[in-house]
Amino acid sequence: MFIFPDMEKDSLLQRIKEGIQDTCYIWAKEIRSTIADEGVLIFCILVPLLYPLIYSWIYNNEVVREVPVTVVDLSHSNLSRQFIRDFDASPDTRVAYYCNSLDEAKALTGKQKVHGTIYIPSDFETKVYRHEQATIGVYTDMSLILTYKAIYLTAQAVSSKINTEIQIKQLKTFTDHDEEVTTHPLEVDEVPIFNTTGGYGNAILPGVLMLIIQQTLLLGIGLAAGTARENNRFQDLVPVSRHYNGIFRIVLGKSMCYFMLYAVMGTYLALVIPKLFGFISLVTAGTIAGFLIPYILSCIFFGMMISCLVRYRENVMLLVVFSTLPFLFMTGLSWPQTSIPGFWQGVSTLIPSTYGVRGFLRISSMGATLADIQTEYRALWIQTFAYFVLTCAVYRYQINSTRKRAYQQIQMLKEKIREAKEKKSSGSSTASTLPSDS
């Protein structure tokens, strides 16, 4: 009576051993397919390696400098020339042209020779010395927000400086301290907490790095799935051998291949790229390791589920190109999260990059730990398990459908072979009953 428990134990161990062997077999086969497919190799290895280098190099300067500006000075006074000198002395702007009218300045802006115009009216100095409010017009090209920011803030700083000098001349004070208290009664000391450089690269790069992981995974997995369907590789879709007799084995085997690859790529993107270009990075190895595991897994299962919609290789290219910008906007990186409509905030909760970008931005720029980003961390694990279950369900449905079609095709072939044999046998029997010429 003690034989049956031992037999059940041996059977269970045998099934576990076969499951591990089958998972490793599918993992090795997926690695060989990835290496053999040039498209998957490019998007899963070359793009994550090279694209962040190009993007970081472009934004390595952080802020724009020496933005060309044209000046329309109708005042031709000492005060207007002082304004122009101070404006040109700023590191952010450069007076490149002088025009006689706004129409000439508009033509230069249309040709992209300048990005803004400073308009000083003819009564500028007269109004100032009459103790009236004078106005200087600032016209900027709004197609690039960085140039607008540089021109507008420089003009504002120069105006404040000249206003202070005029105010001091009109004061009846005796000491410099009296002038300082009168012109600056409240001193403001700006201390940036996180993005200390105030640069665009430190603000946008962390989100782009995390988005690269998701989008390249979608491309690689989608291309592999499209290739399998185009080539009718039933061994990748139908369990024709013992190794494919389990949905968990198939999903785990394929996901292991991409996880091992992107564990290296994720570490490269999160640690090497910011250090290489001098961006702010408060990342610790333990925190980023714990964060990347659920993020990469959620992206993999999300990509495997989406790949079932890919019929041809070209489709995944269109899908990823179309979705890149919406995914970036929905993270709240380039547009405030509170200003995003409720519907799109709901859609964003389904995308792994939403929580991946927000979590990594807090880790990289604010020095957060996993305990500080519990919302994003838990959401990524929930997405991982949810997309794993959905991927298994979709793969089961797809395999059953493919098996059903293959079974129907086999039955049709058997029917045709049987009909051909019947025709052949009936033809031979008719020939045997015909009379001979003799």
Image (cartoon, rainbow, N blue to C red):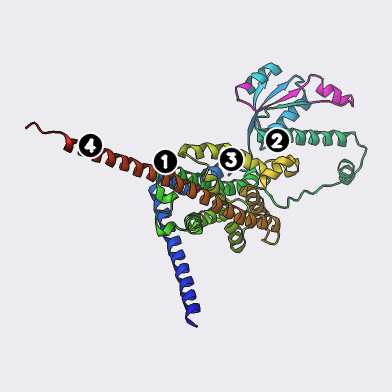
| Marks 1 and 3, the one that precedes in the sequence | 1
Kindly state the secondary structure of the residue where label 4 is placed.
helix
* Disc 3 crowd, CA 10 A, few/some/many (<14, 14-19, 20+): some
Q: Which mark is residue 149?
A: 2
Separation of residues labelled 2 and 3 (CA atoms):
26 Å
- Looking at numbered disc 3 in the image, what kind of residue is underneath it? Thr
Q: Quadrant of residue 22?
A: bottom left
Residue under numbered circle 4: 427
In the picture shown, does residue 304 fall above or below 15? above
Asked whether residue 360 is drawn in magenta, I would say no
Q: Nearer the viewer, mark 2 or mark 3?
A: 3
- Looking at numbered disc 4 in the image, what kind of residue is underneath it? Gly
| Marks 4 and 2, the one that precedes in the sequence | 2
Residue 47 rendering spot, x and y as whole percentages:
48, 45
| Marks 3 and 4, the one that precedes in the sequence | 3
- Looking at numbered disc 1 in the image, what kind of residue is underneath it? Glu
- Looking at numbered disc 2 in the image, what kind of residue is underneath it? Lys
